[in-house]
Image: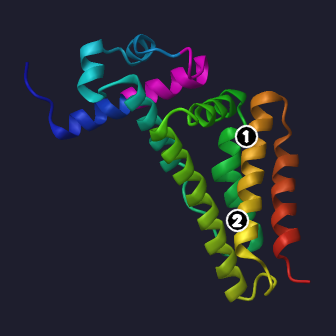
Amino acid sequence: MPRLTEATAAKRRMHILQAAAHCLFERGLLATSVDDVCAQAGISKGAFYSHFPSREALIHAVTDMLSAELGPVDDSSIAALADSVFERQIAPALPPANARFGIEITAASAGDLGLRERNTANLERLRMAIEAAVRSLVAAGKARPDADAEAVGWLAQAHVMGVLCRNAVWPAQDEAALRRATHLLFESLLAPV
């Protein structure tokens, strides 16, 4: 059998990751097996294991892929910061299956060092990005000069995690209300008096 080119191997790996994400969102973390992913991707187990040494490695890779898709926060204004946190961090967790997956991954992190490191890194990346945005807004005179960037980062991180938990438990959510709540959080903490 001829070896895959690097580009073809990368494309196949991404196809497997997307199939795995579909299965994980549809079935949940505990119910998704390697067989499920192979069936969804239309590949053999041998093809799966040529790209991922284990189910655990696949879960780690899916987590990395999904976190990379979240993107940066916008520090051009308080409203832009609130919108970018909502669009990049909260909106993806609005579908109950997505929120459930996020909660399952967070819970699994308690016993999986690799997932814990990834989740911690993702949460810290979010918090630090918000802190940097707040400092930028203060420096530009667009936020109150006494704004505590670190506290805002922690509160925003807690808001995102709270919405994730809420959406995993209560499937009926009001997107407009959640967007307003996100704006209210940032406006109340940062708007010049």
The stretch drawn in magenta includes residue 25:
yes
Q: Secondary structure at mark 2?
A: helix
Q: Label 2: how many residues lie within 10 Å, few (<14), some (14-19) or many (20+)?
A: many
Residue to which mark 2 is pinned? 153
Report whether 76 appears left or right of 185: left
**Residue 92 horizontal/vertical position (percent):** 65, 42
Q: Which quadrant, please, contains the C terminus? A: bottom right
50 shown above or below 182 = above
Q: Which quadrant, please, contains the N terminus? A: top left
Query: For the magenta stretch, what is the residue range?
Result: 16-31
Q: Residue at x 50, y 28 (%)?
A: 21
121 shown above or below 12 = below
Q: For the residue marked with disc 1, what is the amino acid?
A: Leu
**Residue 24 horizontal/vertical position (percent):** 54, 24
Which quarter of the figure has residue 30?
Answer: top right
Which quarter of the figure has residue 77?
Answer: bottom right
Numbered mark located on residue 164 in the image = 1
